[in-house]
């Protein structure tokens, strides 16, 4: 037997914080060595943090990376252990994303990334170059200070592997695993048995299975040990890296780390038998045949043994049942961990949330409550870093620390119900009960006097006083009155976040949390600069349907029982007067359901559909319920409002990324914000298709067909004229 003990890790790095990152790297290496591992794998670009973005273009970033690597190498950290460490470096005039393979205080090889991630949230080609010379290794001259410290001037650089006395090891960096022809396929035919994948993979709902299946597939038919390391936490942006480091051998997961954790360092150790790899490969005839005529990959020889022989004192890691979180758990734990990192690193003393008693803001409150529970749980488990952060943020003295999540929430979380004459008693009560269940410091404020003062000022200036539509006003008046309420709430929220800590003799400031969901952002169903304009938004990329499922789950599993009643209530903005014959509802205002919005969003972003192809796809999807004319009307209605309201995405609160159809403008969904909202060419093509096929009945006429009504101006100053039922007020508060 050839027994090999390996270690991989989740690290909570912080972009551009070299002290923090270096400390975590050293800690992970120490833990790996203490466990007896002879290979240690860290995440991609771990020295700098993955999310440095244009800081990668600064020479300082590369210089500091070399300084940190040198500090690791001149110490005892790499003695007796192969370490793969991620960092950027420059060769000639090109900048590369690299894994530096080190052992015994020397650099054995530098492996530049050959295929860069450059879609969705990733922009690696903006900062790095792909390594294209796959047929050879070249010499890389080390910086003078590093060369002098290591007594080593040149190292092999490029695509290749390390041949030890008893096994062969190679790196495969993040995106390379998911390419059509991944390097591990060719490397396996060249005899590589251990693959090290350093990654920077962010969390997205329901995404983990795709990643795990890729690891399993890489070794199921080729054999091998696949090690995976990832970042975990918020390293400074909208993404949460969800860890889940793991070790796979011959298609079996034998070690799996956490996906959501507050720990800064998590090291996962597995012990495998490399003879099992040889045995599997030798039993597959096609593998043998392809290996006999393979293309040769360059390698370097290292006269060192990594494996131990048969030893009854060393147990092998057994296959595990893979742990997957439900989407509801992902919504609770992912944004909860992200909020904790943001809070502890921002210098803030807590959060303030405008809590309406509706589904969206209640979801945000519940996520903060979950965060408090996670903090208390980690402290109880002995995490000293979480304890120190919690003591500092909660301003504990005399050796005290959080032991109860509700008590901790009272110290760091304000909620405020900002009601008007249009608010119902039910939502006011729901907000208070939920705040009490979480433990938040709750405020109840009426904003009617502020609204009245603004309207009086307007009347003094113009001689006119606007009225709601139910009271005889126009659609323009109706919409403007709703927007006044929404924007007052934003101003009041930021005022309270600044002054309430001072009122309670607490230092610092509170971060204002937003609560608009991904569907509202896609449709533009929010007022510019209302309560959707906050410091950060943990649910801005989560669909309404997923949030409602989360509320049902959280009512039971987080202990916030009032969420069941909140989830059951119909979504409403409560910005218009309640009358016996009229009650404002979100889906009526929007002219589409939240379920339909999710469908539109996925077709628009994930399947890259324009108006015509969306119409064609929906004819197949909805053709059993709707006529082609009705489907055409729905598609036109969506694209009209999407394009008119796209400008709102330019000021959307930075949101936790969780959904693949997020309309977030600045990083993920790069599209213009000024459209011809009539879409004349595209809508004409749809009309042509309707006229061609409308006679072919494929469905019964849908009931409750939405009728376009009055012409109203879009909220927030608008960028066009739109048709809607009652205007288009915000749905954030």
Image (cartoon, rainbow, N blue to C red):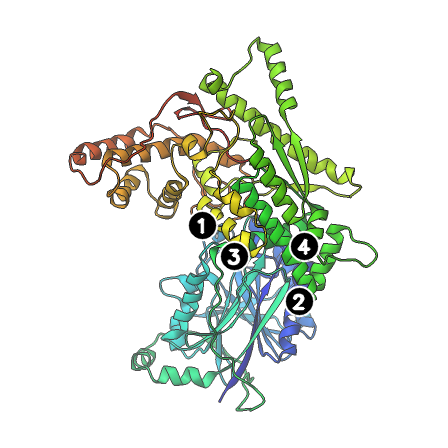
Relative to 543, 558 lies left or right: right
Q: Are marks 3 and 2 in contact (CB under 8 Å)?
A: no
Mark 3 nearby-residue class (10 Å; few <14, some 14–19, many ≥20):
some
**Helix, strand or loop at mark 3:** helix
Count of numbered marks: 4
Circle 1 sits on which residue? Answer: 120
Q: Which residue is mark 3?
A: 329
Residue with the mark numbered 4 = 405
**Cα distance in 3D space between marks 4 and 3:** 18 Å
- Upstream in the sequence, badge 4 or badge 2? 2
The answer to whether residue 495 shows anywhere in this view is yes
**SS class, disc 2:** helix
Q: Secondary structure at mark 4?
A: helix
Q: Is residue 531 left or right of residue 640?
A: right
Q: Which mark is residue 2?
A: none
Q: What's the CA distance linking mark 3 and mark 1? A: 24 Å
Mark drawn on residue 70: 2
Q: Which callout, 4 or 3, points to the residue nearer the camera?
A: 4
Quadrant placement of the C terminus: top right
**SS of the residue at dot 1?**
loop
Q: Earlier in the sequence, mark 2 or mark 1?
A: 2
Residue 110 quadrant? bottom right
| Label whose residue precedes the other's in the sequence (3 or 2) | 2
């Amino acid at each position: 037997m050839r027994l090999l003990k390996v270690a991989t890790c989740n690290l909570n790095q912080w972009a551009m914080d070299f002290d923090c990152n270096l400390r975590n790297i050293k800690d992970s290496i120490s833990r790996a060595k203490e466990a007896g591992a002879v290979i240690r794998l860290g995440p991609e670009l771990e020295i700098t943090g993955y999310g440095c973005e244009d800081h990668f273009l600064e020479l300082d970033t590369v210089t500091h990376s070399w300084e940190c690597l040198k500090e690791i190498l001149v110490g005892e950290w790499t003695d007796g252990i192969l370490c793969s460490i991620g960092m950027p470096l420059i060769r000639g005039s090109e900048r590369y994303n690299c894994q530096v393979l080190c052992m015994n205080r020397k650099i054995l090889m530098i492996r530049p990334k050959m295929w860069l991630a450059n879609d969705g949230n990733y922009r690696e080609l903006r900062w790095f170059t792909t390594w294209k010379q796959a047929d050879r290794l070249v010499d890389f001259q080390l910086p003078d200070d590093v060369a002098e410290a290591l007594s080593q001037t040149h190292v092999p650089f490029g695509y290749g592997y390390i041949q030890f006395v008893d096994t062969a090891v190679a790196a495969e960096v993040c995106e390379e695993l998911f390419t059509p022809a991944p390097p591990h396929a060719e490397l396996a035919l060249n005899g590589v048995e251990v693959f090290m994948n350093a990654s920077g993979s962010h969390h997205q709902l329901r995404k983990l299975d795709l990643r795990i299946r890729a690891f399993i597939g890489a070794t199921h038919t080729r054999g091998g040990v696949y090690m995976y390391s990832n970042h975990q936490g918020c390293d400074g942006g909208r993404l949460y890296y969800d860890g889940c480091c793991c070790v796979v051998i011959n298609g079996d997961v034998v070690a799996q780390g956490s996906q959501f954790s507050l720990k800064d360092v998590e090291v996962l150790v597995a012990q495998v038998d490399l003879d099992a790899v040889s045995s599997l490969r030798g039993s597959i005839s096609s593998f043998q045949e392809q290996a006999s005529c393979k293309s040769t990959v360059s390698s370097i020889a290292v006269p060192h043994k990594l494996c131990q022989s048969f030893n009854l004192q060393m147990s092998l890691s057994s296959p595990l049942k893979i742990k997957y979180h439900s989407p509801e758990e992902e919504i609770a734990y992912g944004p909860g961990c992200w909020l904790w990192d943001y809070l502890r690193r921002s210098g803030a003393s807590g959060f303030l949330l405008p809590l309406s008693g509706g589904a969206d803001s209640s979801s945000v409150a519940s996520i903060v409550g979950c965060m408090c529970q996670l903090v208390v749980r980690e402290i109880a488990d002995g995490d000293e870093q979480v304890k120190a952060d919690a003591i500092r943020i909660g301003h504990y003295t005399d050796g005290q620390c959080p032991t109860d999540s509700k008590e901790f929430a009272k110290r760091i979380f304000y909620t405020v119900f900002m009601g008007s004459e249009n608010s119902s008693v039910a939502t006011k009560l729901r907000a208070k009960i939920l705040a009490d269940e979480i433990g938040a410091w709750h405020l109840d404020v009426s904003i009617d006097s502020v609204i009245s003062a603004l309207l009086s000022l307007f009347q003094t200036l113009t001689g006119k006083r606007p009225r709601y539509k139910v009271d005889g006003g126009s659609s323009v008046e109706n919409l403007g009155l709703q927007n006044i309420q929404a924007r007052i709430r934003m101003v009041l929220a930021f005022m309270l976040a600044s002054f309430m800590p001072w009122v309670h003799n607490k230092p610092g400031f509170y971060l204002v949390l937003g609560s608009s969901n991904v569907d509202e952002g896609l449709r533009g169903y929010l007022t510019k600069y209302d309560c959707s304009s906050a410091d950060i938004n943990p649910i801005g990329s989560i669909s309404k349907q997923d949030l409602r499922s989360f509320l049902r789950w959280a009512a039971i599993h987080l202990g916030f029982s009032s969420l069941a009643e909140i989830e059951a209530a119909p979504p409403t903005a409560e910005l218009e007067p309640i009358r016996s014959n009229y009650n404002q509802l979100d889906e009526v205002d929007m002219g589409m359901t939240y379920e339909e919005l999710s469908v539109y969003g996925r077709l628009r972003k994930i399947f890259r559909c324009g108006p015509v192809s969306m119409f064609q796809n929906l004819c197949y999807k909805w053709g059993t319920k709707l006529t082609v004319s009705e489907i055409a009307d729905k598609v036109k209605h969506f694209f009209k409002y999407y394009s008119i309201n796209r400008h709102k995405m330019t000021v959307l609160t930075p949101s936790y990324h969780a959904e693949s159809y997020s309309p977030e403008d600045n990083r993920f969904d790069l599209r213009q914000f000024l459209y011809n909202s009539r879409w004349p060419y595209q809508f004409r093509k749809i009309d042509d298709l309707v006229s061609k096929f409308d006679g072919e009945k494929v469905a019964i006429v849908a009931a409750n067909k939405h009728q376009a009504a009055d012409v109203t101006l879009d909220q927030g100053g608008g960028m066009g004229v739109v048709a809607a039922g009652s205007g288009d007020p915000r749905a954030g508060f």
